[in-house]
Image (cartoon, helix red, strand yellow):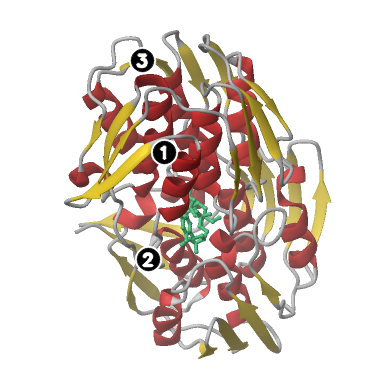
Amino acid sequence: MKKLVINGGYPLSGSVKISGSKNAALPMMTACILSDHNITLNGIPDLADVKTLITLLDSMGMKTKKNHKGSFTFNASEIESKFASYELVKTMRASIMVLGPLLAKHGEAKVSLPGGCAIGARPVDLHIEGLEKLGASIEIKDGYILASAERLIGSTYSFPKKSVTGTANILMAATLAEGETEIGNAACEPEIVQLGELLNSMGAKIEGLGEDFISIEGVENLEGAEIEIIPDRIEAITMIIAGIIAQGELKVENINPLHIQQPIELIRQCGAKFEIFEDSLFLKGPDTILPISFETNPYPGIPTDIQAQLMVLNTIAHGDSKIKETIFENRFMHILELKRMGANIGIDGNTAIVRGVSKLNSAQVMATDLRASAALILAGLIADGKTIIDRIYHLDRGYENIEEKLLNIGAKVRRID
Ligand code: EPZ
């Protein structure tokens, strides 16, 4: 199993270019099922999750053409299979987002339940509830979602709690439903906004993107489109934190500052200095890092996907901090590994209490999920000596060429078997 070896203690400097957003690319790839025309997505990151979804779509009969690095054209006019197997879905839970488009376009779907994952049970009951409101008949049998609908009928569905991929599924399904659909308590993440923008450029009639309340007027069919994927805001913040804790002076390119406003305002509290430009920023890490307490929230709040990375910053801050995880019930696995590196962290329910220490010690550690693996890399960058991170297949799901990016800004990192 591949490992990452990091020799810590080196300051980072130079510039790093952020890749396209994984969580924008995945739903937009499933949206291609809704049309019989060519949809070209540019800036798709080269990630394991993207490869898995292409494998799934191809297994259904999607025609996929790679134009050049990061640019793919999808054509769903010859899709035959409406089946998403457990083998594929269990490795990439976002596969659940084929459910809404298959139901809307083909009136049927057999999609494996994703099953749990390290950070929580992550049920898909709200996806199912929403699609039933649109008139789908859904049965759960042998671990699969068996769904059918003559034609989906527009309706009103209000999410009892915000769900990013849940909103994506209902939004996509509603574009071809008969009549008007209203989604309440919708996810406002930039990735969902761009999904809606793609759908509208395909001929959908969606209003309220980015708001809690989205309305969709169903249409008979959707056309072709082309779009450039937004930058990955989670990778951007991960790199910003790397620059700060490694006492760096770093330029971070290909970002959308509007998508990371609250995280930047929070991170300023640690003493970091930022110069922000239209699609990039320059940061200077402080000599003394001050602790930053926060809780995770749906967009535009502090994303749960940067909680582990911000915790690493707090492990070497001058003082105590509190981190409350409000989205997932088990997203503290990285704490055990950070404590093995000398961090002083206590857990009280869904709140972590971090007491800053002068430095972290290198160790052999194990990644448990995508963002925890990023946090362990950050810890390795600042720990004395050689940190070895195992199970980095988690990392490859969501960070494109991360070693190359880190090497180019002065980190000492390499991959070994
Ligand atoms: C998306 O997951 C992201 N994944 C996650 O990023 C991200 O952490 C999460 O949103 C929250 O922002 C993609 O976009 C591919 P949710 P998703 O539905 O949609 C509960 C990463 O690192 N819930 O917004 O699966 C759920 O258990 C990944 O890139 C239900 O109870 O998350 C959670 O507690 C990790 N029933 C909360 O809602 C449902 O039917 C939010 O989940 C759906 C969700």
Cα gap from disc 3 to disc 1, whole angstroms: 15 Å
Q: According to the image, label 3 marks what residue?
A: 76
The label on residue 121 is 2
Along the viewing direction, whichever of 123 and 395 lies nearer the viewer: 123
Whether residue 108 is visible here, answered yes or no, is yes
Q: Residue at x 51, y 86 (%)?
A: 343
- The image position of residue 234, as x and y in percent, is 58, 52
Cα gap from disc 2 to disc 3, whole angstroms: 32 Å
* Quarter containing the C terminus: bottom left
Whether residue 399 is visible here, answered yes or no, is no
Along the viewing direction, whichever of 65 and 80 lies nearer the viewer: 80
Q: Is mark 2 within 8 Å of ligand 1?
A: yes
Q: According to the image, label 1 marks what residue?
A: 97
Q: Specify which label sits upstream in the sequence, 3 or 1.
A: 3
Cα gap from disc 1 to disc 2, whole angstroms: 17 Å
Q: Residue at x 35, y 49 (%)?
A: 93
Q: Residue at x 65, y 63 (%)?
A: 297
Q: Amino acid at mark 3?
A: Ala
